[in-house]
Image (cartoon, rainbow, N blue to C red):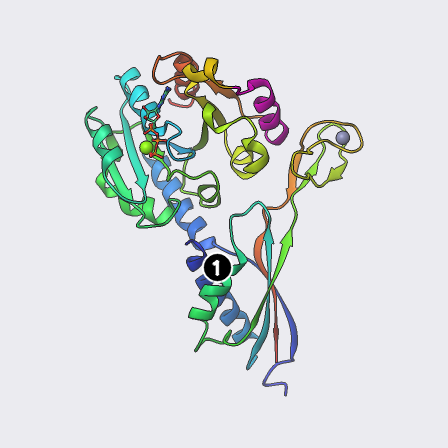
Amino acid sequence: MSEQGTPGRIPVVEKLLTANEQVAADNRDYFAARHVTVINIMASPGAGKTTLLLATIEALPERRIGVIEGDVASQIDAEKIAETGAPVVQINTGGACHLDAPMIRRALPALPLDDLEMVFVENVGNLICPVSFDLGQSYNVALLSIPEGDDKPYKYPGIFEAVDLVIVTKWDLHPYLDFDLDRFTELVHGLNPDAPVLCLSAKTGEGLRDWLHWLEARLG
Amino acid sequence: MHELPVTEDILRIVADHAQKAGATRVTHINLVIGELTSFIDDSIQFYFEMLSPGTPAEGATLRFQRVKTRFRCRQCTREFEPEGRNWTCPACGALGGDVIAGKEFYVESIEVT
Ligand SMILES: Nc1nc2c(ncn2[C@@H]2O[C@H](COP(=O)(O)OP(=O)(O)OP(=O)(O)O)[C@@H](O)[C@H]2O)c(=O)[nH]1
Ligand SMILES: [Mg+2]
Ligand SMILES: [Zn+2]
């Protein structure tokens, strides 16, 4: 009996997915050793992530920026970024709805990190799953395009609670839609009072300057 | 999709603790999952049935304890559960609060013979 141990309940209390967190911590050290600021961009499919990255790279020609593109399949976004001349690596998750830390680690050798100041990670378009997987980023940014509606914090509180900045994209469409910015901001701040909410249009350039200021303040 | 690595993690943790306890059979695995995490019971169950045969967890029943999201009001410290579009503190009327529950994701205990 004693050799078999006692039947009954054994307390465990062990967190799940710690393997991802360990790799994320390694990635974070790796970036820190090279003084690279890493920004994880999370949003729905089509919210304007790639368009914003293209506008950002164009607006900051003196900054050494690299990009990690996450998509279920295809090289489309990486090809768009490559046209700017910025170093880019495409990760195809092969069905997974989020990036994880091991995927980032495998992608790192493809980027000239010693020569970069900043890396943007475009996560897979999804408001739910990416939040649960730390990548080793320095900052999390959520994009919400105004056609998606101002009630999204109610439905996806996890992402708005987890980020350092919220950007309302496609602001040029504001006259045509009933997006209530005050209501949206109130909900975001209800969850996360520290996250600024910025509005911009990557198409017209309106509001882009506030985003660039936010970025510059986080670089050396 | 991400329930696959999660289930592998569960099996590793269970095997580890069952072995330490010298248990021959694991009858129950008690999991605690916060509502704010994106993990789905049915998918974990599905992968568990696929991966557990031949491991110490074979035949065990998975029990899922779901934890509701809870806010702590930043104005008056009252704790409450937001319901749908009602994020208002029942004590003072402030909107939202610090998330104090709903992000849990762990193996709470196992039951063995
Ligand atoms: N009107 C308007 N359209 C925009 C803006 N930004 C992006 N778009 C359009 O929105 C569509 C999707 O933009 P993307 O940048 O590809 O969006 P994404 O989030 O990278 O999409 P996925 O990577 O496929 O998830 C494209 O047709 C863009 O031209 C904007 O500021 N205003
Ligand atoms: Mg894109
Ligand atoms: Zn209150």
Would you name the residue on which mark 1 appears? Answer: B43
> Residue A210, image x and y in percent?
44, 14
* Badge count: 1
Three-letter amino acid code of the residue under disc 1? Ser
Q: Residue at x 49, y 19 (%)?
A: A177
Residue A215, magenta (yes or no): no
> Residue A44, image x and y in percent?
42, 35
Q: Secondary structure at mark 1?
A: helix
Residue A76 falls left or right of residue B111:
left
Residue farthest toward the front in the current orientation of the protein: A176
Q: Residue at x 57, y 26 (%)?
A: A194
Q: Which residues are magenta?
A: A178-193
Q: Residue at x 41, y 54 (%)?
A: B1
The answer, for residue B100, to whether it is visible in the render is yes
In which quadrant of the rendered view does residue B29 lie? bottom right
In which quadrant of the rendered view does residue A135 lie? top left
> From the image, which quarter does the C terminus of chain A lie in?
top left
Residue farthest toward the right in the current orientation of the protein: B91
Above or below: residue A135 compared with residue A10: above
Question: Which is more toward the observer, A204 or A189?
Answer: A204
Classify mark 1: residues with Cα within 10 Å, few (<14), some (14-19) or many (20+): some
> Residue B42, image x and y in percent?
52, 60
